[in-house]
């Protein structure tokens, strides 16, 4: 009988986190302990000189099926494999959001024998980072509403109709997307139409993951745009003197978390922005900490390469100066058959014709990463239902594109199943010729930057703007935000903004319906298609299968 992810994790013998730290040449004095198996790492560990000497590997994927293609599992398995072949490697990942944990996608601690542990803690409250981000976000919302209600000189004259800041919570709850606050008479405040976003979509999450230190964190928080006064003056968080208190709530959350893999290798986990509505990668601080302490850092960026990897390179690397030396694109036989037109219920049956057709999606992601000037390795994340003929077709096809593909069997075998993949990645790193090439120049106009993403990365013919978006474009230019990079809010289910267009669609237009201004985080968010910043639960949420027994042992997490 095949064990579930949580059964495998619970059967593991965890090493004391002090022992894991010693692998990185850290002592107990370097740790802020959260029990025996988790610890926070201080910011002063980062050494820019060491970072330049070491190797960053980015794991991304083809356009995924609804359940994902296993980037986290491959990232952890690859790290185990690198250590098996004698490399000093650390995996650096995002923290899971409770929305997917209790929704449809499940947790984000890997799977099978490629997991980070303690799996239950990581997938649930962990060290409280998400809670701190939520509180900091909602403090700003309270300060805004309080100022609107206040009298005298302290009142900034904020027009409630222009307020863009929403409250957040880390749960999929569609009923909170659009709400009215301030009911109950004068004491309840001014009735206002607003709503909630999920915590992973908060600008505070994006800021935390792009901040370099406490000073930078406060600077970015101060720049958050919240709305306008009645006479049209822009109001920022600094006008409410909010940055100090908000940063104080984040004093521990800004520090990355050290845990371990099933095979006892170091894992750093920090931050958790979604990639379809934010930058989709762990913090700059976590990545730089890993690169300071290890020769190889394996990190992942959410969803397909058109989202997470593009934002990792064009936003995170643009601000931090980081540059990967290789990109691993995770592909599965089942997803490629899905992109070839096979129904979700038929993906376990061999279908070489559909697989061949679906390879067009992989081709586009390979071409995009090559355009960034980075060596590519394709990791075929193997499932039991995959046939030898299907796997061989993918490997032969990737070789025809001038790149190398290797099977990843980390889910079934841990590091023993990823050693060939690890060797391919080391070879790819050795071929790296320099820094990545960005998709666009930040100094270009907003329209030109969006057009570059639409045509170069997605394969669109052009871009159309709704009336609201056109009005907001003028506002962006007026506020001097036009030189910021672009963080597209787009479906993860297609290269286009229409989730029904699978494979490698052509002849489509990207439709921008509106913009959101993340002045603090430092990017502009064009919202395309039907994207939402507060997801809903599926008809049968994963929460229904999660339980805890009389001894406190959790079951049902995945």
Image: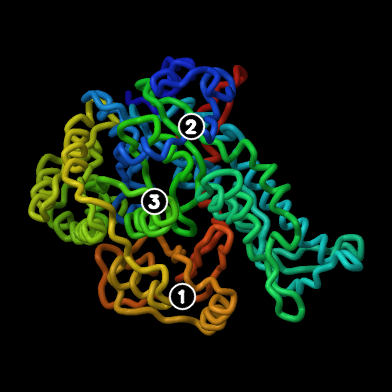
Among numbered discs 2 and 1, the one appearing first in the sequence: 2
Q: State the image coordinates of residue 3 (x, y, percent, origin top left).
A: 37, 25
> Quick check: can you spot residue 436?
yes
- Color theme of the render: rainbow
State whether residue 530 appears in this view.
no
**Label 2 CA crowd tier, 10 Å (few <14, some 14–19, many 20+):** some
Looking at the rendered structure, which numbered label has been put on residue 321?
3
Q: Is residue 402 above or below residue 499?
A: above
Instruction: Give the class, few, some or many, for how many residues have Cα within 10 Å of label 3's Cα (few <14, many ≥20).
Output: few
Which of the two discs, 3 and 2, labels the residue nearer the N terminus?
A: 2
Residue pictured at 28% horizontal, 34% vertical:
78
According to the picture, the residue beneath numbered tag 2 turns out to be: 45
Residue 164 x/y as whole percent? 65, 67
Residue to which mark 1 is pinned: 512
In this image, 76 relative to 284: left or right?
left
Residue 140 drawn at (x, y percent): 72, 55
> CA gap, disc 2 to disc 1?
42 Å
Give the answer, above or below, for where 232 lies relative to 350.
below
Q: Secondary structure at mark 3?
A: loop
Q: Classify the position of the N terminus by image quarter.
A: top left
Question: Which of the two residues, 279 or 12, is positioned nearer the viewer here?
Answer: 279
């Amino acid at each position: 009988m095949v064990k579930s992810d949580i059964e495998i994790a619970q059967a593991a013998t965890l090493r004391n986190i002090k022992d894991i730290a010693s692998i990185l040449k850290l002592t107990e004095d370097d740790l802020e302990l959260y029990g025996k198996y988790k610890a926070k790492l201080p910011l002063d560990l980062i050494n820019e000189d060491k970072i330049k000497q070491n190797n960053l590997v980015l794991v991304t994927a083809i356009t995924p099926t609804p359940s994902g293609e296993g980037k986290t599992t491959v990232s952890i398995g690859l790290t185990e494999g690198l250590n098996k072949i004698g490399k000093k490697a650390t995996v650096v990942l995002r923290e899971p959001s409770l929305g997917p944990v209790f929704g449809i996608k499940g947790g984000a601690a890997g799977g099978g024998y490629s997991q980070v542990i303690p799996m239950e803690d990581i997938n649930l409250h962990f060290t409280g980072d998400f809670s701190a981000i939520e509180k900091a976000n909602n403090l700003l919302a309270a300060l805004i509403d309080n100022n609107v209600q206040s009298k005298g000189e302290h009142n900034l004259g904020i027009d409630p109709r222009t307020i863009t800041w929403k409250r957040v919570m880390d749960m999929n709850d569609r009923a909170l997307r659009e709400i009215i606050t301030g009911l109950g008479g004068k004491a309840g405040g001014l009735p206002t139409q607003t709503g909630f976003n999920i915590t992973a979509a908060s600008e505070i999450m994006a800021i935390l993951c792009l901040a370099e230190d406490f000073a930078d964190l406060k600077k970015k928080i101060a720049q958050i745009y919240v709305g306008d006064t009645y006479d049209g003056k822009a109001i920022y968080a600094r006008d409410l003197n909010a940055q100090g208190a908000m940063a104080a709530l984040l004093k521990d959350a800004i520090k990355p978390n050290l845990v371990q893999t099933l095979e006892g290798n170091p894992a750093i986990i920090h931050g958790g922005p979604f990639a379809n509505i934010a930058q989709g990668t762990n913090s700059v601080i976590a990545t730089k900490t890993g690169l300071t302490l290890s020769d190889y850092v394996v990190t992942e960026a959410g969803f397909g390469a058109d989202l997470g990897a593009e934002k990792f390179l064009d936003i995170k690397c643009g601000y931090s100066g980081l540059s990967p030396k290789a990109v691993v694109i995770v592909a599965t036989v089942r997803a490629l058959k899905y992109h070839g037109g096979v129904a979700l219920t038929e993906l376990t049956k061999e279908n070489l014709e559909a697989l061949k057709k679906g390879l067009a999606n992989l081709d586009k992601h390979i071409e995009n990463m090559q355009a960034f000037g980075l060596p590519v390795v394709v990791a075929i994340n193997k499932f039991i239902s995959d046939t030898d003929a299907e796997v061989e077709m993918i490997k032969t096809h990737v070789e025809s594109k001038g790149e190398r593909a290797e099977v990843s069997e980390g889910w079934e075998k841990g590091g023993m199943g990823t050693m060939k993949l690890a060797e391919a990645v080391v070879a790819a790193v050795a071929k790296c010729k320099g820094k990545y090439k960005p998709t666009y120049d930040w100094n270009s106009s907003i329209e030109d930057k969006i057009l570059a993403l639409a045509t170069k990365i997605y394969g669109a013919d052009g871009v159309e703007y709704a009336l609201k978006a056109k009005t907001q474009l003028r506002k962006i230019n007026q506020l001097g935000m036009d030189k910021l990079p672009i963080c597209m809010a787009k479906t993860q289910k297609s290269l286009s903004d229409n989730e029904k267009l699978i494979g490698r669609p052509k002849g489509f237009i990207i439709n921008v319906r509106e913009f959101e201004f993340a002045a603090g985080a430092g990017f502009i968010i064009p919202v395309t298609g039907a994207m939402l910043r507060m997801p809903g639960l599926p008809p049968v949420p994963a929460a229904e299968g999660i339980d805890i027994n009389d001894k406190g042992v959790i079951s049902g997490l995945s």
